[in-house]
Amino acid sequence: MVTRMESNSLTRNKNNFLKKAKEALEGTRFTQIEHVLETTSTNSDLVLRAAEIKENAVLVTEHQTDGRGRLGRIWEAPEGENLLCSLLLIPDWDSKKNPLVTSALAVSIVNVLSNKGMEALIKWPNDVVISGEHFGKLAGILSEYVQGTPSKVIVGFGLNVNWPNGSKEGPEGAVSLKMFGKNYDKWELLFEVLADFENQLRLLAAKGGELKLRQNHISLSATIGKLVRVDTPKKKIRGIAEDITQDGYLLINDGTNNIEVSSGDVINLRETNE
Ligand code: BT5
């Protein structure tokens, strides 16, 4: 179900954003900011424009007509309701650390939500979930890389603020802040996430900072220590999620071997009784 907002309410959202953003993001690397009312996908936009963009950039929108998850999946959000944002990053860290950008952003989103008293955790590799009885996916992150000199990282996230408005709406397992009775201004949330993300990226760039970042991720993980099944593009692996490596990979112990997984979907078996 798609709810359509009035266009003047969307324009109000935009003006509200532009008014606050400059000041809120001062002192961070996120000073190039753009808001469009509608686009295909904020990630796709930044990937297409990556060659011409010379500074770190922020792109937000009220509506995506082709919002993307990983592996060609769809990211859903009715116009105006949720936070939809992509960042183009010009790394000041070694490109070997690029896969940890997803971790860094997930940590930031969880930090912001935890500060608001929510039980948010990171489900490896790219989901922010609410743990406990009303377990569900609140946000998803999509990182992409554009080769070149310098190479660029495009990282986007969708965070469900007002939609879905109940368990019968939206993709299976999706939850929103509204479903937990939380009413936050989506732009204030974004500014808080970006302020924290600035700190995580500084950590990423610092010598040895990736170790601290990895610890941050592990301490906020909904996956580590759990019996899981990981569906990778090639096979399904069942075992205990032991660790996250320095490259951001998941280490699974299947009872015999430790297996490093670079991408895949994690199913927590205790929650599903499989
Ligand atoms: C993700 O992929 O979770 C990454 C989502 C990234 C979205 C942002 S929005 C701004 C930027 N521009 C883009 O085009 N993308 C980024 P993945 O792990 O593959 O999960 C996708 C799956 O999540 C779908 O197949 C659905 O099952 C589910 N899903 C779709 N929309 C959702 C929503 N709003 N909330 C929770 N789950 C959702």
Image (tube, helix red, strand yellow):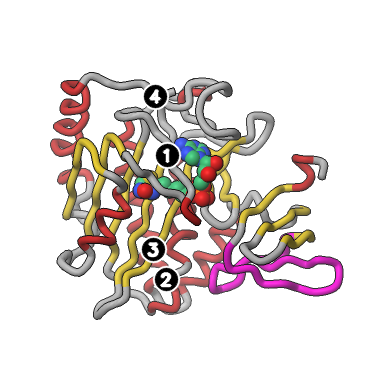
What residue span does the magenta drawing correspond to? 241-263
Which residue position holds label 1?
159
Give the label, 1 or 3, closer to the camera: 3
On screen, residue 273 versus residue 124, left or right, reads right
Q: Which amino acid type is shown beneath numbered disc 3?
A: Glu
| Local SS, label 1 | strand
| 113 w.r.t. 133: above or below | below
Question: Please, what is the three-letter code of the amino acid marked with disc 1?
Answer: Leu
Q: Earlier in the sequence, mark 2 or mark 3?
A: 2
- For disc 3, the marked residue is 144
Residue 98 circle label: 2
Tell me where residue 120 sits by quadrant. Answer: top right
Q: Quadrant of the C terminus?
A: top right
Q: Amino acid at mark 2?
A: Asn
Percent of width and height locating residue 14? 18, 33
Task: Indicate which disc, 1 or 3, sits on the residue closer to the N terminus.
Answer: 3
User: Circle 4 is placed at which residue position?
Assistant: 2
Please state, as top left, top right, bottom left or bottom right, where the N terminus lies in the image: top left
